[in-house]
């Protein structure tokens, strides 16, 4: 089977051929005798001893037959069990939580002899469901068999699949040998993302190119770098001083808009969240952060994902991702698939990591924060000063209502657009409410 994302290479598991390995393998084969095989072997040995003592030739032949039959089955199974190749393919290898993925198993008989009865069992974490088992009656020489099963998890994470175990049995049921392959694959269960409406963020209409126009104005007329006139250029952009200097029509260069930036901040402090499981407030926040980041990437933003530890998601430019980067969305979702609670006492590292651009405020800041005490509320107020627009999603009902309302009032007065939520709320509805608030979300410049 061709390799690829989520595909395991062929795993034949052939022995190296050293004498001690062959002896150990033969002992393992003898240990695979079933109750029937051991009974035949014991009966054959007993008949042989009795025939020798009593001098009965016919009984001796019966004893030899009973003894030889399980031993021959051991020998045949021992020779053929190392000539079976297996491979695995995941479809897809990255799946949202609560969605199903299909695992395809392929078994090839690469020996010159047909196999007996085979039973396949794949090792699967209990969170993905029961261990799948398949029975294959007979595989001809050079033949192949393909089977598949489905896995599903409500919890995000990275789950190993494998190694595949193969149990071989002879037609007489004398021997059963279990063989474990070495290859395994990893299924990545990423947080579910919700499609968000393309709302108009405050300041977005006139934001593109504004910083560029400002820098041109500050540079002065003499510092403008012109270019030659092209057919279709607006004559109002002709730079007459450069035209006189070069003896041909020169125009000002087009104003290049700066790429909008956004920082998505996810609070992972263990003390900031209550409850666990797929329906907890923390899992809602992780899913919300993924949805917002993917949505803004699709809208052309350069997105940075930051946690309370102050470490951004690995990206090509200091953790900043944009839609032009290879597999940008996959990198973002893979990181959020494994994010867990941290032991950070507060948000100070996240505040330091925000920093601002060139000493000034950054663009849009979208934060998913948990429960905050007075100190963390002060830090959140200071974070607002490092962004041109700020949107805050905060869980509702995790602390005393009066104290919670006071904290939210302080943050609103600082300029945050605060949107309380409870697990199960639709993020798209909250996103529309943020647009209708009309004041606090600004686009990065």
Image (tube, rainbow, N blue to C red):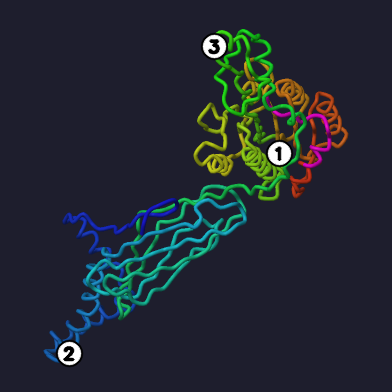
Q: Using residue 136 as the reference point, say whether residue 330 is left or right of it.
A: right
In space, the residues marked 2 and 3 are separated at their CA atoms by 119 Å
User: For mark 1, what is the residue?
Assistant: 273
Tag on residue 247? 3
From what the image shows, is residue 20 above or below residue 169? above
Magenta highlight on residue 438: yes
* In the image, residue 439 above or below residue 299: above
Q: Is disc 1 surrounded by few (<14), some (14 to 19) or many (20+) residues within 10 Å?
A: many
N-term mark: 1 or 2 = 2
Who's the residue at 11% across and 89% down the image?
55
State yes or no: residue 19 in magenta: no
Residue 59's disc number? 2
Residue 100, percent across and down? 57, 59
Left or right placement of residue 42 versus residue 332 in this view: left
Residue numbers of the magenta segment: 432-445
> Which residue is depicted at the point 71% across and 34% down?
369
**For marks 3 and 1 on the same chain, the one whose residue lies earlier in the sequence:** 3
**Whole-percent x and y of residue 57?**
12, 90
Q: Residue furthest right?
A: 402
- Say what secondary structure mark 1 lies in: loop
Q: Is residue 53 above or below residue 222?
A: below
The one of 65 and 124 positioned closer to us in this rendering: 124
**Residue closest to the eye, 76 or 260:** 260
Q: Looking at the image, which residue is at 35% across and 75% down?
A: 117
Label 3: element kind: loop
């Amino acid at each position: 089977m061709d390799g690829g994302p989520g595909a395991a290479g062929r795993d034949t598991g052939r022995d190296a051929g050293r004498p001690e390995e062959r002896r150990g393998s033969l002992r393992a084969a003898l240990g695979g005798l079933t109750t029937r095989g051991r009974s035949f072997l014991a009966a054959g040995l007993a008949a042989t001893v009795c025939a020798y003592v009593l001098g009965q030739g016919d009984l001796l032949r019966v004893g030899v037959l009973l003894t030889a039959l399980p031993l021959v089955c051991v020998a045949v199974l021992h020779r053929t069990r190392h000539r079976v190749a297996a491979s695995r393919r995941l479809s897809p290898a990255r799946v949202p939580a609560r969605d199903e993925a299909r695992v395809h198993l392929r078994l090839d008989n690469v020996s010159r002899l047909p196999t007996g009865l085979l039973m396949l069992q794949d090792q699967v974490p209990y969170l993905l469901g029961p261990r799948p088992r398949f029975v294959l009656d007979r595989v001809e020489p050079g033949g192949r068999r393909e089977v598949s099963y489905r896995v599903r998890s409500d919890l995000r994470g990275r789950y190993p699949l494998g190694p595949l175990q193969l149990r071989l049995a002879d037609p007489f049921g004398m021997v059963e040998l279990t063989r474990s392959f070495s290859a395994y694959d990893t299924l990545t269960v990423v947080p579910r993302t919700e499609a968000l409406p393309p709302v108009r963020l405050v300041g977005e209409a006139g934001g593109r190119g504004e910083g560029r126009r400002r820098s041109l104005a500050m540079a002065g007329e003499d510092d403008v770098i012109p270019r030659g006139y092209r057919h279709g250029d607006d004559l109002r952009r002709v730079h007459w001083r450069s035209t006189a200097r070069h003896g041909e029509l020169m125009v000002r260069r087009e104003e290049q808009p700066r790429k909008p930036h956004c920082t998505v901040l996810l609070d992972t402090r263990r003390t900031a969240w209550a409850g666990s499981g797929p329906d907890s407030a923390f899992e809602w926040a992780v899913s919300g952060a993924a949805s917002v980041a993917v949505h803004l990437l699709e809208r052309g933003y350069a997105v940075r994902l930051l946690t309370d530890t102050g470490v951004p998601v690995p990206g090509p430019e200091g953790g900043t991702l944009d839609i032009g980067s290879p597999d940008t969305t996959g990198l973002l979702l893979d990181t959020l698939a494994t994010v867990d609670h941290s032991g950070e006492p507060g948000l100070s590292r996240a505040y330091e990591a925000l920093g601002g651009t060139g000493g000034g405020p950054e663009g849009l800041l979208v934060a998913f924060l948990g429960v905050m005490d007075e100190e963390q509320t002060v830090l959140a107020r200071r974070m607002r000063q490092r962004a041109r627009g700020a949107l805050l999603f905060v869980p509702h009902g995790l602390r005393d209502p009066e104290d919670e309302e006071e904290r939210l009032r302080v943050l609103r007065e600082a300029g945050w657009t605060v949107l309380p939520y409870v697990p199960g709320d639709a993020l798209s509805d909250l996103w529309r409410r943020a647009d209708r608030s009309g004041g606090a979300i600004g686009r990065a410049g």
